Image (spheres, grey):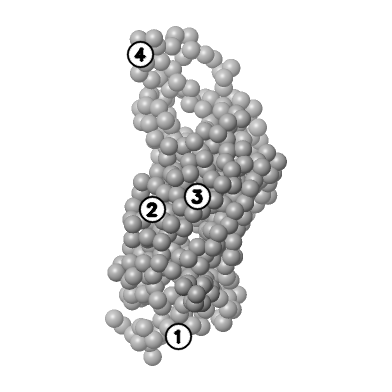
Amino acid sequence: MTARTRDGIRAIIFDVLAAIAPEADPAAIAPDKPLREQLDIDSFDFLNVIVRLHETLGIDIPESDYAELATLDRALDYLARRCGAG
Amino acid sequence: MAEYEFRMPTLGADMDAGTLVAWNVKPGDAVKRGQVVAVVETQKGAIDVEIWQDGIVDKLVVEPGAKVPVGAVLAMLAVEGGPAAAPAAAAEKPAAVAAPRPVAPPVQAAAARAQPAAATGRAKISPAARKLAEELGVDPATLVPSSADGVISRADVERAAAAAKTAPAAGGKATGADWHAQMRAAIAAAMSRSKREIPHYYLATDIDVTRVSDWLAAENLKRSVTQRLLPVVPYMKAVALALREVPELNGFWADGAFRPSSSVHLGMAIAMRGGGLVAPAIHDAERKSLDELMADLRDLVTRVRGGRLRSSEMSDPTVTFTNLGEQGVDGVFGVIYPPQVAIVGLGKVSARPRVEGGAVVARNVATATLAADHRASDGHRGGLFLTALNRLLQEPEKLR
């Protein structure tokens, strides 16, 4: 797997969120506030976020790690760590 | 050959009319029971309308663009009749049956005719895109999807609207129907009727769901991301099984009497992006495995979000299940969707102190609720339902 940059991962997160919540404005997302509340994402949409991240980044995200994706900042940290981003 | 009148189906208590958007069939086509033959626009989005009769399309009575009430004849079908086939005169019945209140504005009807609905090859459109198209006065039938999945997106609508603006459009008049207001009106009508007509009673019970949570976590650990079960799935199965034990909660109240249903068609309350909700049915939920329920739920939510629901899903639910707890509420006391007689609610799962064997322990607890129609059942029976639900949830491994 090619190492990804933090910015690259951020762009991928935005792409995934845009596909799930097309009416959302990525620039308006508060990075330290719960993503699901801000984007009105239910458990089904959230599972789709996980599936799409899995497909795009090629990493398996266990259910026990879902909390790591609660906010944009935490998701970035977590995914960067899992992808070995420098 | 006998003649069969294909009528506008009931699409739920809050819909008394719909606009025919397109026919998927033409005169001379053979149709099969269960086939989607038409698309109807309702206050809750476009619906694929199925036919429940085999036959040959004889005549399309209603043209695309026309708004027709529930029960109106949409098409005539020639069907294999017994020896006592209906007289040929019936087939000749002229357009008296036709054109029931063509309420559609001429502009819209003309636009629809200009697009002779390339029958089967219609592109899908997401509800958000359809809403935007209405707001911007773009005819969805003129749109072409740009993405590989073949679904028309908001971006496609915006592009088409921008193109229409730059072109010196003749008759570029926005139809301007406020989709959101229509959705609210539909919900208002059904819920007002419910509160006016149905004597609700309400019950609640806290259920220790630790075993379900643990079982599901272990189960999902074994599964790949795409195979995982959503937390609500085992509850769907338990609700369906518990309803089999208390059939007074599963069915319709019609013409002053309760009509129980032999199957549980579980209406799943699903929020629509941008507001409003629908509660389409998962058919025969009590007989399905958890994997089947998950597949059905995935299919249903995906179509609520970006595709189309089918008429049977809108008209069939025999009971509603709302999982509002996932939004963080502790309990939900629902408003029954007529003509159903009950709505089951599940609150959020949270760690709460419970007393077990004289000691306080932390357990995962969820509040299950029931709002039921007192004409069809009593609190005692409702209580038995919640008790059964509790019992079933203590043995999640048996819910498969």
Q: Chain of mark 1?
A: A
Residue, disc 2: B293
Label 4, label 2: how far apart the Cα atoms are: 39 Å
Q: CA distance from mark 3 to mark 1?
A: 46 Å
Q: How many marks?
A: 4
Which residue is labeled 4 in the image? Answer: B82
The 10 Å Cα crowd at callout 4, few under 14, some 14 to 19, many 20 or more, is few
Marks 4 and 2 in Cβ contact (< 8 Å): no
Amino acid beneath label 2: Leu
Residue B288, image x, y percentages: 35, 49
Q: Which mark is residue B385?
A: 3
Amino acid tagged 1: Asp
The residue wearing badge 1 is A77
Do badges 3 and 2 share one subunit? Answer: yes
Looking at the image, tell me whether mark 3 or mark 2 is earlier in sequence order.
2
Q: Work out whether B92 lies above or below A61.
A: above
Q: Nearer the viewer, mark 3 or mark 1?
A: 3
**Which residue is painted at 42% across and 83% down in the image?**
A78
Please report contact status of discs 3 and 1: CB closer than 8 Å, yes or no.
no
